[in-house]
Image (cartoon, rainbow, N blue to C red):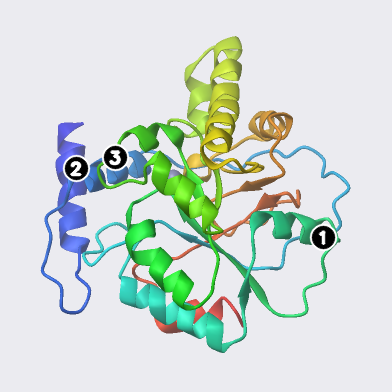
Amino acid sequence: MKTLIIFLAALLVIGSSVCPGQPAEQLSARQEETAISRAGFSSPEPKLPAAESLQRQNTIPVLMYHHLTDNPVLDGDLCPGVFEEQLEFLAREGYQTITPDYLYRFIRGEKQPEQPKVLITFDDGYESFYNKAVPLLEKYDFEATLFIYTDRIKDREGYLSASDLQELARRGISVQSHGVTHTPLTEISENHPPEDSEQKIKAELGKSKELLENITGSPVNHFAFPYGSFNSEIILSAREAGYDLLFIADERETQAPFIVPRIPIQRDMDKENFRDIFR
Ligand SMILES: [Zn+2]
């Protein structure tokens, strides 16, 4: 295990970079932890329950961001300047941002957008959303959605606090659930006997929803699977817990319209790759 950690850390250091005009940064504990947990996990192809009577597959692009930083190290890290270029492009092309509630109504066939739409999402509750993303979103009059795992709210350093979330919700940011512990839900079902795993998965889905609703005073109806990991039982549990849309972490299309693919926006994505999403 130790060798694997050193190997992964070395890989990340080699792969790290800085935004124009910024000093280099060492790999932090956060980055090691995230890289190791990401490296150890891959999502299997799930069997899906039959689709409910939803009208259509989503054709509105859903972008998945994580962390804005001047020293991008992980794949999900992005320079604030690159993020601004992307927003500028969307504004120039006439895109309007939407909420997950709008997307749900669109998939149900209740919305017929006249202008091109895009859904901007940020996972994991990094403080950089508040400090770096929100000023840029407000500059372009765009909205965004946060997927928060609730254990991280207690852990203030570098992450959004409960009062940040309250304020962001007041400013029109949609705050939705990403579980309690950020454990891949399939890992819970693999590592525990069925009765235990069912309870644990229910807690990930239900407690996070309840806590976020208490913090923001707004409904939490949508869930993003940690690491995009799910199977058919997990989907049923998530629907039972009251979630409408279930977001994954890649562009894979599924037969169920309420399972929403997302496009990961990564630090190695150049301008052309980004623009290709909207062609
Ligand atoms: Zn996450």
**Circle 1 residue:** 56
Q: Nearer the viewer, residue 46 or 78?
A: 78
**Circle 3 residue:** 156
Please indicate whether residue 107 sits to the left or right of residue 184 in the image. Answer: right
Please indicate whether residue 275 sits to the left or right of residue 107 in the image. Answer: left
- Alpha carbons under labels 2 and 1: distance apart: 43 Å
- Is the CB–ligand 1 distance for label 1 below 8 Å? no
Q: Is any atom of residue 273 visible in this view? A: no
The image shows residue 270 at horizontal and vertical percentages of 39, 79
**Neighbours of disc 3 within 10 Å: few (<14), some (14-19), many (20+):** few
Q: Earlier in the sequence, mark 1 or mark 3?
A: 1
On screen, residue 202 above or below 172: above
User: As shown in the figure, which amino acid type bears the numbered disc 1?
Assistant: Arg
**Neighbours of disc 2 within 10 Å: few (<14), some (14-19), many (20+):** few
User: As shown in the figure, which amino acid type bears the numbered disc 2?
Assistant: Ala
On screen, residue 204 above or below 256: above
